[in-house]
Amino acid sequence: MGDGTSPADDLLAAWPSMTADDRFDAFRHIDRAEVGGFFLGLSTSDQVAMMQRVTVGERQVWLRLLAPDDAVDVVQHLPAEERQSFLELLDEATRREVAALLAYAEDAAGGLMSPRFARLRPEMTVGEAIRYLQRQVQARLETIYLAYVLDPEQRLCGVVSFRELLAASADSPLAGVMRTEVISVQASMDQELVARIMARHNLSAIPVLDAAGRMQGIVTVDDIVDVVEEAATEDIQKLGGMQALDTTYLETGVLSMVRKRAGWLAALFLGEMLTASAMGHYENEIAKAVVLALFIPLIISSGGNSGSQATTLVIRAMALGEVTTGDWWRIVRRELLVGICLGLILALIGLVRILAWQEMFHTYGAYANRVAVTVAFSLLGVVTWGTLAGSMLPFVIRRLGFDPASASAPFVATLVDVSGLVIYFNVAQLMLGGSLL
């Protein structure tokens, strides 16, 4: 094509906006030379959708094209009643590998790893190791760039890169070339923690060991990219005030979407009813000084916004491992100072704005100066409180054993709305008592 793209590239770009029928029809017409690469580039859910609509013979071809860890993802996406029929399409050796991986939790390192990695023995010479790896190139290994040195009990002794082998003398013992300080993970480790370790040490692959120290497989960076994307998507959806979706946005049905969003929305609505109750409590004050009602949205939104900022920052820091529950006191001191600074900035802006409008338009009556000071002090208190509450809520939720991302921005805003009104009207009673109130 003129722009250098192939029909398969064009199809991949249009794929998200296509219906299921259009996708399958287009998939069937991809050129034979490109269809394999196109299939491997699809998401697991799309691979499943394609295989469920082809003949059994074609399904076997596509399933056997996948690496064991990718085949596991496909099987886990299937309804329980279809899984066995798919497993029976695999060759015996691959079926055993897939069955072993299915024994691990889906979100653990064991469920993420590939059992196909380059193995070497410590008694080999460098030349023997290179010749052995050359024969392994056709073995559909996950990666050939790193080889793992195992003893007869399959315990990890070291790791060596292909580059290190080529740079060493052919008759050098492998034991003298390999690196023995190897970062590894347990098969039961959560996949997000695995991703964090790989990112921290800038690894392209990491070995996975069982409880006895025997090497079971490797997790590669391409697997981790999927994990990071999935975790970030889930956290962002929770921060928006809803349950995380199980599938992509367009693949989620309307009823499922309603179920995911209605519960949190109802809870937030009930929370906001407390705001109405708080305003009812101060009904007399509002009746005496109607001007106070003008600044209610300003006050509560400022507190909610500052709380949402703090919550988002702390949750992200927790997700990256930068902050643990033991750091809560450091966060309190830090956010208290930040909250005071932010509150002073907004208080100054609010003060100048009210006095300027009063000077130009005489909007706020004879007690405009006191109203301006009331709003300024209220903003200082509400923003400081919102920042503290927003930063501490994720710690409370984690202490209770839940995902800190559940401390969504709308939830924090709702919490701060009620307390913001209390702060505002108590400051007003202090500042305006004997005059407007």
Image: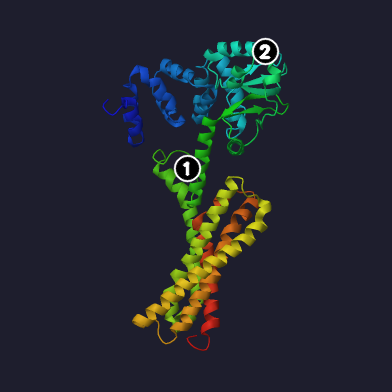
Give the SS element for disc 2. Answer: loop
How far apart marks 1 and 2 lie (CA) works out to 52 Å
Q: How many labels sit on residues?
A: 2
N-terminal label among 1 and 2: 2
* Residue at 58%, 46% in the rendered image: 319
Pick the residue in front: 357 or 129: 129
Mark 2, residue position:
125
Q: Position of residue 419 (x, y in %)?
A: 55, 68
Q: Position of residue 168 (x, y in %)?
A: 63, 17
* Residue at 48%, 69% in the rendered image: 346
- Left-right relation of 133 to 28: right
Quarter occupied by the N terminus = top left
- Left-right relation of 418 to 147: left
* Residue at 34%, 26% in the rendered image: 8
Write down the quadrant of residue 396 in the picture.
Answer: bottom right
Q: Residues within 10 Å of mark 1 (few under 14, many from 20)?
A: some
Mark 1, residue position:
245
Q: Residue furthest bottom?
A: 434
Q: Position of residue 279 (x, y in %)?
A: 49, 73
Q: Is residue 406 among the parts visible in the rendering?
A: yes
Pick the residue in front: 334 or 312: 334
* Above or below: residue 293 compared with residue 105: below
Pick the residue in front: 205 or 405: 205
